[in-house]
Amino acid sequence: MKKVFAFLLALVLLPAASLGETIVTSFYPIWLLALNLADGVPELEVRNLAAPGTGCLHDYQLQTGDMKVLSEADLFLVNGAGMESYLDHVFSAFPDLPVAEAAAGIPLLTETDALTIGENEDDGEVNAHIWLSAANAAVMAENLAKAMEAQFPDRQEKIEDNRKALQARLLALDQELREGLSGLPRKGIITFHEAFPYFARAYGLDIVAVVNREPGETLTPAQLAQLAEAIVALDAPPLFVEPQYEDLSARTLAAETGAAIYTLDPVVTGPEEDVPPDYYETVMRRNMETLREALGGE
């Protein structure tokens, strides 16, 4: 009986046999692109490393479970541009794991504050939120598709078909956003996180202030008062919060200045199961409609 129990225990502890190959993505926007590129590709699984509610990977630390997932990966797809600060640990722990950066070849912006709050001054740090331009997302899709095709050459044809279809959709979305956000009576917005500079540059908006350089920062009463004064001087442009972060500072500033609050979604969180292939496009169109409402579009 003891021998039978030991045998069964050993079977349970054995790693599950893989039915195919596994792509791991670093976080939600990369996962959405990879799901589209791998759609219908035989024996190719796409797994996401950071939970869908994580948001941007600011100061994200790899967990034990993450290391196990990476140990089973055949390809690791990441945003790049500094978003995944833990990559050196991945290279060290898994020197043979291919890693592809979606940001390759995309001109990068540096983080700036249009309004200086406390110690937040432009330090030249790269802004990694590249996917919030649909045209950039199309380039990212191509970079990821090339890596997938190189790693899985026997499935290149289907991946390439998916890449062409996805890029066509993203470029059509880019044109739709450009047209939908052109000619607005107002262009100035205030955001609470450095997520939207690529979006603003692509679609003709002006970020006049960023309140919190990083999510989770808390402004002092003196800093809030300073910012409120500056907002009033700017004729109270709309304040935009993000669905995954607390907006206490926004509520305080709105009460002090009369500025209206709206929500913009940076597409870093979303459903984990039964994800619609066009989820990215749906959220970006929702952002467009929110901006049109906030900035006086008809």
Image: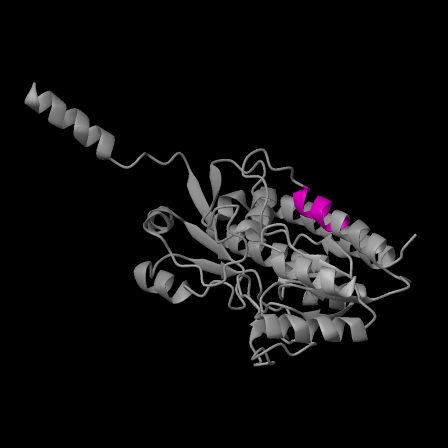
Q: Indicate the position of residue 91 as horizontal and vertical percent values.
A: 36, 63
Q: Is residue 235 left or right of residue 45?
A: right
Q: How many marks?
A: 0
Scheme of image coloration: one colour
- In this view of the protein, can residue 108 be seen by the observer? no
Magenta residues span 278-285
Q: Does 16 appear in magenta?
A: no
Name the one closer to the observer, 184 or 169: 184
- Residue at position x 79%, y 71% in the image: 232
The quadrant holding residue 40 is top right
- Residue at position x 80%, y 66% in the image: 237
- The main secondary structure of the magenta stretch is helix
Query: Quick check: 136 above or below 35?
Result: below
Name the one closer to the observer, 77 or 209: 209
- Residue at position x 44%, y 52% in the image: 75
Name the one closer to the observer, 262 or 172: 262
Q: Indicate the position of residue 215 as horizontal and vertical percent values.
A: 55, 62
- Residue at position x 35%, y 47% in the image: 65
Q: Is residue 5 left or right of residue 42?
A: left
Name the one closer to the observer, 25 or 214: 214
Query: Quick check: 144 above or below 52?
Result: below
Q: Indicate the position of residue 66 as horizontal and vertical percent values.
A: 37, 50
- In this view of the protein, can residue 227 be seen by the observer? yes
Q: Is residue 70 left or right of residue 223?
A: left
Query: Quick check: 221 above or below 9?
Result: below
The quarter of the rendered structure image containing the N terminus is: top left
In the picture as drawn, the residue positioned furthest to the left comes out as: 2
